[in-house]
Amino acid sequence: MKKITVLLIIALLALPTFLPTVGAAEKEVKVGVLFSITGPFAPAGALAGYRGSLIAMEMINDKGGVLGKYKIRPITADAQSNPDIAIREAERLISVEHVPIVLGDYSSSIGVPLAPICEKNKTIFWVIIAISDKIVQDRHQKYVFRVQPMGSQWGKSSVEFLNENYEKLGYKSPGEIKVAVIHEDGPYGVSVSKGNLERVERYGMKVVLKEGYAHTAKDLSSLILKLKASDPDVILHTGYFPDIVLFFRQARELGLRTNAIIGHGAGYANFLLLEKSLGRQIVNYTYNVDPAPAQILDVKKLEPGMDRLIAEFLRRYKEKHGEADPPTHATQGFGHTWILINEVLPKAIEKYGEVTADTVRMTARELDIPEGATPCGYGVRFAPPGHEYAGQDLRSYPVVMQWVSGKVEIVWPGSLKTIEAKLPLPSDSPFAK
Amino acid sequence: MRSPLNIKRGPILLTVILGCLILFPVFSPSPYLIHIITLIFIWSYVSTAWSYMGRFGLVSLGHGAFLGTGAYITALLFNFFNLSPWIGMLIGASGAVFLAAVLGYACFRSGIIGDYFALVTLAVGELVALSIIAMREITGGSLGFTLRSLGNSPLYFQFGSKVYFYYISLLFLLFALYLWKRIDKSKMQKALKAIGEDEVAASSVGINIIRHKMAIFIISAFLTGIGGVLYAQYITYLNPHTLSGVTVSLAIPFKAILGGMFNIWGPAIGTAMIVSLEEYIRVSYGTKFVGVSEVVYGIALITLIIFLPKGLYGTVLEIFHKRQRSAETIT
Amino acid sequence: MLEIEGISAAYGEFRVLHEISLGVRSGETAIAVGPNGAGKTTLLKVISGLLRPSLGKIYFDGQRIDDQETHEIVKLGISLVPEGGRLFPYLTVLDNLKIGAFSKKAREEFRKALDEIFGLFPILKDRKKQLAGSLSGGERQMLAIARSLMSRPKLVMLDEPSSGLAPKIMARVFEFVRRIKSQGYSILMVEQNARKALELADHAYLLESGRLQFHGGAEDFVKNPYIKKAYLGI
Amino acid sequence: MFEQILNAAINGILLGGVLALLAFGLNLIFGVVKIIHMAYGQFVMLGLYLIYVLTMQVHLPLVLSALIAVFAMAILGLLTQLLVIGPLLEAPRLNQLLALAGLIIVFENLAMVIWGADYRGIPLYLPILKIGNFFIRGSCLFAFLGALITLGLLYLFLNKTYIGLAIRATAQDTEIVKLMGVNSRSVYFITLAAGGALTGIVAAFFTPIYTVHPHFGSSFTIMAFIIVVLGGMGNLLGGFISAFIIGVVTSVSAVLTTTEIADIIALLIFILVMLVRPQGLLGTRGI
Amino acid sequence: MPPSLIQVLIMLSLDGIGKFFGGLAALSDISLKVEEGEFLGLIGPNGSGKTTLFNVISGVLKPSSGRVSFMGADITGLYPDKICHLGVARTFQIPRPLKDLTVVENVMLGALFGDSGRSTYHSEETAKRDAIKYIDFVGLKVGELTMPDELTAAGLRKLELARALATSPTLLLADEVISGLNQEEILEASSVLNRIRDEMGVTIIWVEHIMGALMSLVERVVVLDYGKIIAEGKPSEVSGDKRVVEAYLGEEEQEVY
């Protein structure tokens, strides 16, 4: 009897699986919001991005919607950090929910398969956070847009920074700098390290070590031994959070010495947590390459109004999730979504009278936002379909930041610089040579 | 165990179900439903292939290795050498067979069975996943890679509409079921059953243990390799984590067990149940109760395993037989 | 002391015991004989709680035990020497004896029991540091019996103590049984070797195909023509 | 180069200590209950979280938090036995294995619901040890010594107590042990509790080394299995030794090749050893 | 007729067989020849190595030293199925029926796989016919759907015999086919063995640790003790041998039935 009951329950549960959400009211814009809110990518930043994205929509809706009348209805979906599930959810959003736009996801391994699916189904894929070049490179997609820098730009920025500061290391030319490139071997680390290497090669710097490792690695001591043996001036590191912590701890225990440790987003973005987990002394003077998080941008350099917008976002984020200092990914989620719903959608409605994938596409293509007019700091201008990086925001760039005694400062590019980089590592760092 | 489908009503019922499945895309408006059912077909096919050996006590926890080998070889041949996946899949599946043959021969020669076989295969699945990641220059590493799109090109296993994949994967599933029937009627099935129960007794009546185990392992690996190709061609994207590695390798036996791996319909029914349950819980509650819905899903799986140890279909059969038996004793 | 009323038992669908009733009086040695597959071992399993009966009741010292767990039954004073001894081969002789005295009461009397056992089976004392798996066949059976006595039982049940042993060792095992009988233990022994077993018995039962066919004193058994022919080879 | 390899070998031995700790409980549970505990790594993850919460949020001293965690993990072990393993004792092996694999999903997401998706680490530094040109990692040395002490305590527990005796006996013959008056169900409970407590101990020694997040456990699972099988399943000493072998092999080969390839090499060695010596390195039974 | 005038065919020949488990010798230096058509008894107390010897001959175990030849060919270390195909069949001391298969199917296995030459064209129907033939021959009374767990001890022994016979052997290794049976059943089983030899012309090696029934049937007895052959000869000679009485029967010779 027990078994029959179990069977009946299963049958009941299985029934309503495939029904779409009902009741699409007039004057509504459906937006598919597809993030990995569970699984390994969630803590790495996907969840923060998702929250940021929803806050942007909420803020618009509180003002009555786009143009004051078109409410945004987010149709949320969980990609579970799994490309297979992400594809299923994208199919559902497109064919059951009929959303014209899919927003998403943190991970490039999800962005890469989703782009062609959305393209094929003539649905806008508004890429948030996922940075791999491959999402747009050589694909000539019409429906895929990304308002943030690409992975290789991360890698290039740090080397550009070095190239301008070789004198601080006591060298006469950039070519003398000894660089070690280490990275987690996922899509993120690989695409950033490619950018590193490309620029390192261009400037003729010496690569003394290049190595990848799984971000789930249990032990990095051998890598550190090799780093010690190769004696680099600069360690260019790309990793997620746990492996960065492991790296710093083991590097300290094994007595690693160098002149600079430059991180590239992801785990390095969450500086406060790094400091909490490792202690200030260990992580002091570490660099991070990333789009600047809203709270550290010098709002005076931005367009008017942006300061209030950012303050409002930070207030809501704290209210909802209890964090006063949200990670960069939250800002990215918020900022990228904001550009879509505050810049693109109103224009599409004004010009074409409705929001469809095609009206959004045509509007977005004409978008021309100058630097400083977005919550992210940089401007927006998408590469046209014929371009190698069609759909990529060509005005976006990451900055190089340095943590100095708990404060984040921008050290590159020169135009945004808040301090001169502390290079080489000051002697109060345990890693200083 | 006799299946209710085999008794007089069987063929009629079977025809009706098959008819419904064939006509479904004609009437269904939702590409999403077609998509989900296609996935159910593909994974049913794979878990059926897994059960080919699982039901004889050869429990592999590394079928992701074959899935990945088949899919990657085929896709790389297509992307780099423009070889049609229709031909490539035979080469890819041969790769899976090669892997199975080496692994099987080594294992069966040294008498690795039971838990040890399960763990060795688990390690092999992981090994394949790590190797794919390490060879990122050609495989794209853990970023995965996308198949070159040719639009509608049946000769290259690419179609403009999902419906084609729906029918193709249905055909493959039917083939796997047919082959299962054929094996059941063959001497091989008896030999494997004997081996599964008692290897010493089996070999003492002249059954060549290694040869039979190798045979079923190779068949299973071949079909699984093709399954990998089918899946990769369908979603046009390959990723080591969704094709090889522990998660997939465990998901396959999960489906077979929860359906009932000893019966021909079990793995397919199990797959349908798991995929539906997964979809249902995630779609309905996934973003409302973040994490909680997954906890519920996990608990549901454990509960099912505890209360339906013979799988869903196995338990239905059991109840059916009990009813039948008690009916017989009354009359 | 032990009373069994109408016990039936089954493995899955397959019924092995059909409404068996028998009893063992205090201080008495009862034996159950019968061919292989008659359900003798099953009977002992049911009494010791390793198998739940599907029907019937079992009383021990007036207390109902058929719904008790095995370890509870052991505590009440019934111990079983399984067929083939079933020692823990990777434990030493001493550890085997120690685990035999696992229950709280037995633990308290462990020293005393050990001295008694070493008195009864001196060879075990010499071997106490050896692994049980390295003992010879007869020594193993000896240890198995000794181990069961460590729990200070009132009733000792032996399952085919002579099975698988060479004749001369077999004879020694029966000698052990005689020794513990003389110590005043009640015994219920199941045995295929009817003739040897009957020499020890006060009371005997014949089981065939899970049914109780005949019971009576040892003399009645020896006189019964059917038993004489089928089991005693006379 | 030689010095580097030697240093890597030292690191490997220390890493071996960490891995050995991990393998103990898994081995114990396999030896007695004959179950492959798929969700073992997730236990360690929960233990780490608990220590984090107690130290950083409740502000208890670290040692006390660790003790509480050990106790709490023992209780979680009991619950696992009660709710999952117990009902499946008679079920086919594969069902047991998959049910425990189902626990992975439950535990990971439960951690996610309770503690959110963030990474948590306790800033805890042990002094740096430098001998000549060699650096000894204090945290791993600590774990290494912890592994030795734990093994010693475990040995005493198994060999000097009645319960330990019952556990060893149960590992050899599950049925007969009942006839000795041992409640075999209690033995299972005790084993699972001991296994759980061991994960608490592992978590305590991991605290200075790793940061925890909901998916922390899975990265250890395969490595732990490899060690256990390599040493001979159920053989505590074998597991201990093979942990060091794996530690040194991965560490040294990571210096010679890359960290990534070292993992592949470890897997390959495992598979090859299995094919040559299926029973594992110390492949006899018994604890 | 003097033996020298007839070409006696040596069917099985063991040459210095030794088998060690760990450091323990289960068999040491066993040499033995079995002629075609012979009915040989192999006795010895428990643990004397009889079953180990069978395992070595049938290929379940590889000998540590020595050579096994069958019909003049070296079969040392071949897999059991190969040896079975050559014509050596065995039964097991503890019956090992395949519990999920019916009794008839169990025997069919022997017919289907036991003879490599025949099995290539052997259909299921003929295999089934053969199986029923052998089941009848050993005197087992079962229906088509009888499962092995419904059989008595005697029934299981017969099933073992029928399954072995279905492989159409020329040499049968019968391992304790009467142990655990009652007197009546012993007589029946012994007569089946006798008929296998006489009617089917199968050479038999019969292992038993109790001697009674065996001594009255076999032509020659080999006695094993602690892995060594301690006596060999006609039953009447062997049972009088002092070493045998001492090692095997001990002081209680008359108790053995």
Image (cartoon, coloured by chain):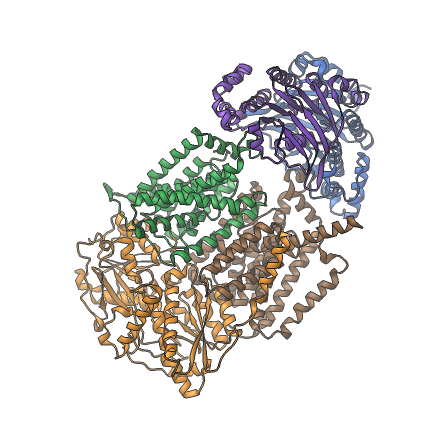
Chain colours: A orange, B brown, C purple, D green, E blue
Viewer-nearest residue: E109 or B306: B306
In the image as oriented, which residue stretches furthest toward the front?
C62
Q: Is residue E172 visible?
A: yes
Viewer-nearest residue: D177 or A196: D177
The relative height of residue E93 versus residue E117 in the rendered view (above or below) is above
Is residue B178 found left or right of D111 in the rendered image? right
Is residue A404 found left or right of C27 in the rendered image? left
Q: Residue B102 appears at what percent x and percent y?
A: 55, 48
Q: Residue B192 appears at what percent x and percent y?
A: 66, 46
Is residue B224 found left or right of B143 in the rendered image? right
Q: Quadrant of residue A262?
A: bottom left
Indicate the quadrant containing the N terminus of chain E: top left, top right, bottom left or bottom right: top right
- Counting the numbered discs, the total is 0
Indicate the quadrant containing the C terminus of chain E: top left, top right, bottom left or bottom right: top right
The relative height of residue D264 versus residue D283 in the rendered view (above or below) is below
Q: Residue B100 appears at what percent x and percent y?
A: 56, 51
Viewer-nearest residue: A152 or A46: A46
Q: Residue A105 appears at what percent x and percent y?
A: 41, 68
Q: Quadrant of residue E208?
A: top right
Q: Is residue B65 visible?
A: no
The relative height of residue C176 versus residue B76 in the rendered view (above or below) is above
The relative height of residue B306 versus residue C70 in the rendered view (above or below) is below
Instruction: Kindly identify the residue that appears in the image at 57 percent across and 56 percent down.
Output: B255
